[in-house]
Amino acid sequence: MERLSIQTDKAPDAIGTYSQAVSQNGLVFLSGQIGLDPSTMELIQKDFAAEAKQVFKNLSEVAMASGATLDAAVKINIYLTSLDNFQAVNEIMSTIFQQPYPARAVIGVSSLPKNANIEVDAILCLADR
């Protein structure tokens, strides 16, 4: 099956040499998203929760551009500059995902692009569609 690049203007443009997502063989690999407002390319800086919600909104827009939703997520990787935000991420994810939840890793990192506090990437499975 052919590898396809997925692009939407409803999520931030790539700030490097990568696609917003790539689809192949029924899987969609969503590149990491940070809390950028796609219309301004500026980081949401109200508070951590607002930034994290923007991250998941961006991921959702890229998922929709692939013909799916985040309900198709089978794996999520979350990168946090402070693991003190772990519980806030759990609370936000509980409003977005339903059981069975995707597999997940949460990793503490020293820094992220644009001084973001959170970055999230995901893998979607479209095989059941």
Image (tube, helix red, strand yellow):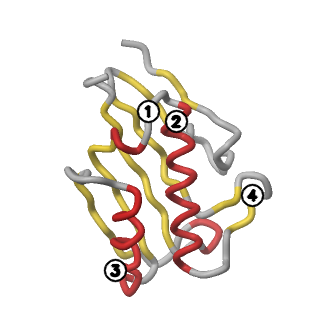
The first of marks 1 and 3 along the sequence is: 1
Judge the density around disc 1: few (<14), some (14-19), many (≥20) Cα neighbours within 10 Å: some
Residue 37: mark in rendering: none
Q: CA distance from mark 1 to mark 4?
A: 24 Å
Crowding at dot 3, Cα within 10 Å, few <14 / some 14-19 / many 20+, comes out as few
* Residue underneath mark 4: 41
For residue 52, above or below residue 64: below
> Mark 1 = which residue?
68
Q: Which residue is mark 3?
A: 87
Q: Is residue 102 left or right of residue 9?
A: left
Residue matched to label 2: 64
Circle 2/circle 1 CB separation < 8 Å: yes
State whether residue 116 is above or below residue 41: below
Q: Amino acid at mark 3?
A: Gln
User: In the rendered image, which quarter is residue 17 located in?
Assistant: top right
Name which residue lies at 57% across and 43% down: 61
Quadrant assignment for the C terminus: top left
The residue nearer to you, when weighing 38 against 5, is 38
The residues tagged by marks 3 and 2 sit, at their Cα atoms, a distance apart of 27 Å
Instruction: Looking at the image, tell me whether mark 3 or mark 4 is earlier in sequence order.
Output: 4
Q: Earlier in the sequence, mark 1 or mark 4?
A: 4
Q: CA distance from mark 1 to mark 3?
A: 27 Å
Q: Secondary structure at mark 2?
A: helix
Q: Residue 21: x, y in percent?
A: 50, 37
Q: Is residue 129 above or below residue 15?
A: above
Q: Nearer the viewer, residue 2 or 57?
A: 57
